[in-house]
Image (cartoon, helix red, strand yellow):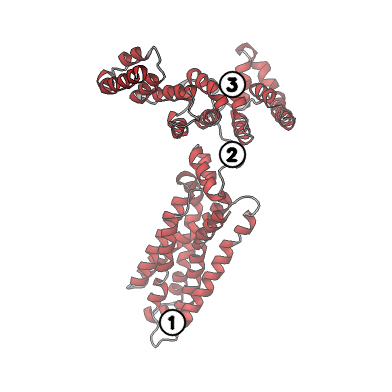
Amino acid sequence: MKGVVLVAIAASIGNFLQGWDNATIAGSILYIKKDLALQTTMEGLVVAMSLIGATVITTCSGPISDWLGRRPMLIISSVLYFLGSLVMLWSPNVYVLCLARLLDGFGIGLAVTLVSVYISETAPSDIRGSLNTLPQFSGSGGMFLSYCMVFVMSLSASPSWRVMLGVLAIPSLFFFILTLFFLPESPRWLVSKGKMLEAKKVLQRLRGQEDVSGEMALLVEGLGIGGDASIEEYILMIFCKPKKLILFLLTPKLLSLSLCTIRVGSRYLDHLIVERKYGEAASLCPKLLVKLTIFTIWVFHFAHLRQLPVLVPYMPTENPRLRDTAYELALVALVTNSSFHKDLLSTVKSWPSVIYSAPPVISAIEPQLNTSSMTDLLKEALAELYVIDGQYEKAYSLYADLMKPEVFDFIDKHNLHDAIHMPLLHHMQSHFTKLFY
């Protein structure tokens, strides 16, 4: 949990800068008015420009952050703070100063809008409320320190309002460095874009633990991720075209019935899980879990219970089809125990290669090469995955080591004669040496 607290503190610097700016302009406006001979209207405009900029940017920051991500928007906020402070430090006249205040306001608007959202999406539920007090605390702290700075500078013989405003560049640069190199992307945003592996890595870093499958499942459920058809579309697939009129009249009741079936089905699966009847629960998943979104949640749930191998035979592979991550997670679960290696090999051979990415599964198996846990079945499964990934030479090496009779057909099929000529001679020489000596 230490990681998520540090991330929340770093993100709340955006509000610290907002408080700093508000206090600085309040203290320096007396010197600005005197130096630039401002009328009351222009004096008010200089103060208000940052609020105008913040109001304008706030109206569109939400949709843009949904598109680009939370972290890039915080980086943009820090850049706007930094550029605005540099222009304020240089301002030769009131018009340039107003432009600088507008840029600064854009940075304020992004920070005020997104910092709380970012903290909410990265914090665990038990401390989310506590961490969301940090932006308010940071803003107040920024105002206090800024008033102290203005007071100290006002004691000099000729206080410079440009320096007062330009000092903002220092914490802004620090904020930029943190957003660029320390803050991760919001795991909720990553899940919403289907980037499950990246979201899992971020959650593992923030929570300080490897098993985050439960929280991943909650994110998937909360966002409603899934490329499956709606329940109405599902009903249309069940009923034939001549019954369109009847279907139209019955759709509201059927929709209600389907939703009820999903809820009841999930509760019954929960009951079976409590009774430790994992096999029975897995066999019922295709019948009870109509929506792919719900099925995906249960994949993560079985993974959390370390019972995912039981569910593998019942996972749909086409029409409907789950997300790639679900299949990769299932294959990796079969790697972890030698008793499932036979199932892994048959699954790799039977599943269409287009429904998952082979490299993550290969990465889970390769560390076991040349260890006691590397069974012949696992080795053959790795060879099959190498073939799927186009790594034919590595696949040949494993097939040859397993003494597969079809290895020569494999060489001809993938034209590996030149690539394996010398390794083959060396392998045969070592084999005959062991045989005769």
- Reading the image, the residue beneath label 3 is 313
* 152 and 197: which is toward the camera: 197
CA gap, disc 3 to disc 1? 73 Å
The residue sitting at 35% across, 67% down in the picture is: 87
Which sits earlier in the primary sequence, circle 1 or circle 2?
Answer: 1
Q: In the image, which is nearer the foreground, mark 1 or mark 2?
A: 2
Which residue extends farthest front?
Answer: 437
Q: In the image, which is nearer the foreground, mark 3 or mark 1?
A: 3
Q: Which mark is residue 213?
A: 2
The residue sitting at 72% across, 29% down in the picture is: 276
Q: Position of residue 118 (x, y in %)?
A: 53, 52
- Reading the image, the residue beneath label 1 is 153
CA gap, disc 1 to disc 2? 54 Å
Q: Where is 100 relative to 288, above or below?
A: below
Q: Where is 261 relative to 195, above or below?
A: above
Q: Is residue 345 left or right of 313 when viewed as pictured? A: left
